[in-house]
Image: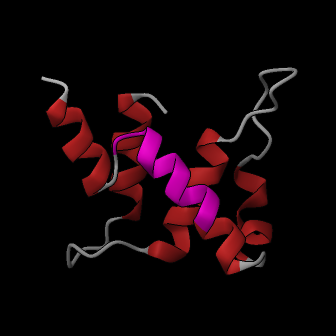
Amino acid sequence: MTAVERSRLVATCTKTDGTVDMEKMYPLLLISSVYDPETGEKVFSALDMEALQEKSASAVEFVAQKVMQVSGMTAKAVDEEGKGN
């Protein structure tokens, strides 16, 4: 995910009270970051949002957590980045 994509995703998923709308966040992470390795095309589109929300929570969370890790969106990823400097 690019920095702009990440910023837009966070803005889209942040509620007015400052909390994160996880019902939106996990599916949007998959939509923005899952690509077919053979074609390089995105696997999901915005039209898949509702279908992703209906999938296994543990499966969606597992993939979303991996996306967050490689996109620098977890505390662990931020800590690891800091160790390289």
Q: Is residue 55 above or below residue 60?
A: below
- The colouring scheme, among rainbow, by chain, secondary structure or one colour, is secondary structure
Point 70% across, 52% down: residue:
46
Q: Is 50 situated above or below 35? A: below
Q: Of residues 48 and 40, which is closer to you in this image?
A: 40
Residue 75 as seen in the image, left or right of residue 12: left
Q: Which residue does the image show at 77% across and 79% down from the upper left?
A: 54
Residue 23 quadrant: bottom right
Residue located at (32% from left, 66% from top): 14
Horizontal and vertical percent position of residue 49? 70, 63
> For residue 11, what is the image quadrant?
bottom left
Across and down, in percent, residue 47 comes to: 77, 55
For the stretch drawn in magenta, the main secondary structure is helix
Q: Which residues are magenta?
A: 62-72
Considering only vertical position in the picture, is 12 above or below 44? below
Q: Nearer the viewer, residue 23 or 62?
A: 62
Residue at point 74% right, 70% down?
Answer: 50
In the foreground, 6 or 75: 75
Q: Is residue 65 above or below residue 45?
A: below
Task: Name the foreground residue: 34 vs 5.
Answer: 34
How many numbered discs?
Answer: 0
Q: Is residue 70 left or right of residue 30?
A: left
Where residue 8 sits in the image (x, y, percent)? 39, 44
Outermost residue on the right side: it is 38
> Which of the 4 image quadrants contains residue 12?
bottom left
